[in-house]
Image: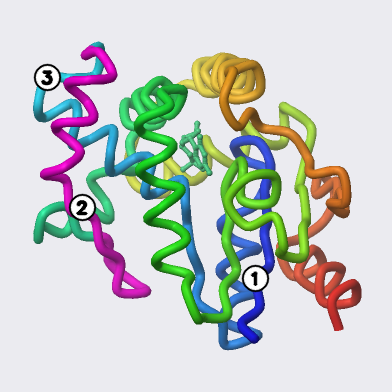
Amino acid sequence: MSEIITIDGPAGAGKSTVARMLAKRLGYLFLDTGALYRTVALYLKEKNAIEANDETIERLLQECEISYDGKELFLNGRVVTSEIRTPEMSELSSITSTKRVVREFLTGLQRKIASGRNVVAEGRDSGTVVFPHGKKFFLTASINERAMRRWRELKDKGLEVSFEEIKKSIIERDERDSCREIAPLKPAEDAIIIDTTDLSPLEVVEEILKRII
Ligand code: DC
């Protein structure tokens, strides 16, 4: 039987780093579901369809092929792994992810990617909706710590953004992700909640390993 571990939480809580490390440690596939939402947002942006109605988006998604080889993410055959990591794509993906058609499309894709494999999935609704049978974790951290992590990440990539701007956009994104009607960001009832504010990624991984082994 394949095993699924889900790691959900708000932006900057440390999900990606921790999930990637944990997957490596266990030899599982790392599934970054936010990257899939970002890729759909990029696709819709390129089709000038961010504000389009459900019918149009549903039709466009029929020609949107996303694949993931465990390392690179492909949008209709083109590598988009770095292109989706900008503040603009953070914003647009948070907006397009509120749409039911987008969520249905990506819920199906996530289950397909995970089918028959051992997976560490990170996102917003991995435990509540997509993989309800997984072992569930929910990471949180203070808003200042989360904004600082995101600011450092962008700075390391050479992007100059102000700390206050990042903090504001994270607060807005949290609000949108948590208040949307479909699959809002929230811990599953049986999720183990870990506050990562004062923990290193390795300490969080150790904490998770203690709970699953
Ligand atoms: O984790 P991230 O920052 O890459 O996610 C980008 C956006 O995608 C996030 O603001 C909300 C959306 N998202 C979602 O709705 N459900 C997921 N499982 C993952 C991401």
**Which of the marked residues, 2 or 3, is nearer the chain's N terminus?**
3
| Alpha carbon separation for disc pair 2 and 1 | 26 Å
The residue pinned by badge 2 equals 80
Task: Tell me what residue is drawn at x 63 percent, y 45 percent.
Answer: 129
**Which of the marked residues, 3 or 1, is nearer the chain's N terminus?**
1
Q: Secondary structure at mark 1?
A: strand
Q: Is residue 160 visible?
A: no
**Which of the marked residues, 2 or 1, is nearer the chain's N terminus?**
1
Count of number-bearing discs: 3
> Marks 3 and 1: CB-CB under 8 Å?
no
Q: Nearer the viewer, mark 2 or mark 1?
A: 1
Looking at the rendered structure, the kind of residue marked 1 is: Ile
Quarter-of-image position of residue 53: top left
Colouring convention used in this rendered image of the protein: rainbow
The residue pinned by badge 1 equals 4
Left or right of 105 in this view: 179: right
Give percent across and percent down for residue 94. 45, 26
> Marks 2 and 1: CB-CB under 8 Å?
no
Task: Tell me what residue is drawn at x 59 percent, y 60 percent.
Answer: 17
| Alpha carbon separation for disc pair 3 and 1 | 36 Å
Disc 2 crowd, CA 10 A, few/some/many (<14, 14-19, 20+): some
Which region shows up in magenta? 52-73
The residue pinned by badge 3 equals 48
Is 176 covered by the magenta stretch? no
Disc 1 crowd, CA 10 A, few/some/many (<14, 14-19, 20+): many
Give percent across and percent down for residue 188. 79, 44
